[in-house]
Image (spheres, coloured by chain):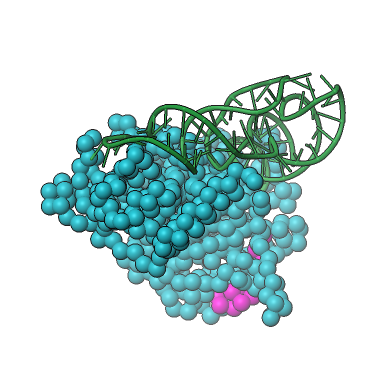
Amino acid sequence: MDNESQLIKQRREKYDKLLAMGIDPYPLRSERTHCIMSLWENEKDFVEKEQEVSVTGRINAKRRQGKIGFLNLQDSTGRVQIFVRNDTVLDDNYELFKLLDLGDFLQVDGKMIRTQTGEYSVLASKLTLLAKNMRPIPTVKEKEVDGKIIRYDEFSDIEIRYRKRYLDLLLNPEHKKVFETRSRIIQGMRDYLNKRAFLEVETPILQPLYGGANARPFITHHNTLDMDLYLRIATELYLKRLVVGGFERVYEIGKNFRNEGMDRTHNPEFTALEVYQAYTDLDGMIDITEGMISTIAQDLFGTQKIDFQGTEINLERPWRKASMLELVKEHTGEDFSNFDLDRLKAFCKAKNIEVDPHAGPGKLIAEIFDTFVEDKLIQPTFVIDYPLEISPLAKNHPDNPNLVERFEVFINGAEYGNAFTELNNPIEQRKRLEHQAKMREMGDDEANVVDEDFLEALDYGMPPMGGLGIGIDRLVMLLTNNVSIKEVILFPQMKPE
RNA sequence: GGGCCUGUAACUCAGCGGUAGAGUACCUGCCUUUUAAGCAGGGAGUCGAUGAUUCGAAUUCAUCCAGGCUCACCA
């Protein structure tokens, strides 16, 4: 018998013993009068008034000492010590106490007292087992020194932390906090948009065609319809249909799926916010991006200057705006504003930038930007005036036929958002998508496909508008100071065991 | 996909050619104010997997599996 099954067998024997004692290890109900945090709001008062309290939680430490014993009881709000004496608990409760394991859920009725060493504790008069632990939880012991928690035998194996996230959350409370922050960030987005009359909507994840981004999709199959469907790579084209339909301000927060590589900034499914607002343009999207993110930071931290891996990031508005060509010039000394393909090719070759032989000047400029500029943009920067060639859904720049009204926003060298003044001319849109299809035929398997249904919707008329996408996982990484996307996704994709 | 590193008890780790170890957790005993409780005793492992070398492999070598970092690819 291996060690694990031995430990489990021991729990099983305790379970049988409990049954023999007439104790239900998994009773129907529990009762509590106080969450543990509320005991600490005025612990002296509880002691003076000898108030009866009833608390519930999980046992995470047990110290027996002859005919007395101590437990640490933890609920989601805090931790309190339970003091058990064989002469103050009811009947067979001390026998129950002896059978309790770390990980058991327990209800404790009693009064708050102060022990000889000065610790406020609940002196138990009655113990009620709420749920028996049948598989030992890994051991982690903690000691507080000068307000700092020193942890012994920390549960730190990264793989097991991701695969058995419940143990990670249980044993590493600071990781639990990351997901609480994540929830508050998403709530902050909803609050910000709802206050501005945006409507939250849901569009299909299963789509007969995919679009709205350059990416390879996941394919699945519907049996009854006997057809392949794609998991969406973006919500863009459906949200635009809704603006055609008269919803002037819509947003969606949801998962996108991209069948591409995985690394510390890419998970195959990731959460994005997309926002569409009629009768505004790129400037409106800049306003939302800056306003929303700086507001969220302020609400979370009380400041807009945050630390990310030792670098101070200042999220105070306004953020820098600079055109892609300007930035390329700033970081390479080269001016490519004439879109001279031969010069671009020569430059890429000289700098060892690998390029697709079909790439036009716009794509090359973007490649050069990625290589020389992107990771230098530490403080929030809106990079504007993108090449039309790589922006099939954005409206033409008024002054330059090679450019469109688009920005991507960069912080700490990574992209956090992407926005356009949205292309609403159906003739132009068809031309762009057909060009994409041509690129596809030439081997670009990330190029867009022609979505006739979307083009038909545009024919009916779509108002001028701005649209914005923000990668939520990466924003959470930024605001929780994490460098791996797996730390901010509860159940990140893992290879099978 | 390339490079580097890691995989030993439930957890954290040591051992790096000669009988598988420690602390915690678990079990037994003692202990009526402990808090990483303590003391004494005990049980617990296919040393990631498969091959090879060797009298002998957790240890050396090869391959594979899983993970991390990093580069490439990718938004």
Q: Residue A340: x percent and y percent?
A: 65, 46
Residue A70 shows in the view: yes
**Which chain has been coloured green in this picture?**
B
Q: Does the segment drawn in magenta span residue A455?
A: yes
Which quadrant of the view contains residue A237? bottom right
A22 or A100: nearer the eye? A22
Q: Residue at x 20, y 57 (%)?
A: A52
Q: Residue A324: x percent and y percent?
A: 52, 46
Q: Residue at x 23, y 43 (%)?
A: A120
B16 or A395: nearer the eye? B16
Which quadrant of the view contains residue A214? bottom right
Which quadrant of the view contains residue A441? bottom right
A133 or A426: nearer the eye? A133
Q: Residue A255: x percent and y percent?
A: 53, 62
Relative horizontal placement of residue B19, taking residue B44 as reference (left or right): right
What range of the chain is rendered magenta? A447-458
- The tint of chain A in the picture is cyan
Relative horizontal placement of residue A184, taking residue A491 as reference (left or right): left
Q: Residue B1: x percent and y percent?
A: 74, 41
Residue A408 shows in the view: no
User: How many numbered discs, if any?
Assistant: 0
A410 or A355: nearer the eye? A410
Image height check: is A432 above or below A149? below
Q: Residue at x 38, y 63 (%)?
A: A190
Q: Does the segment drawn in magenta span residue A54?
A: no
Image height check: is A441 above or below A163? below
Q: Residue at x 56, y 51 (%)?
A: A9
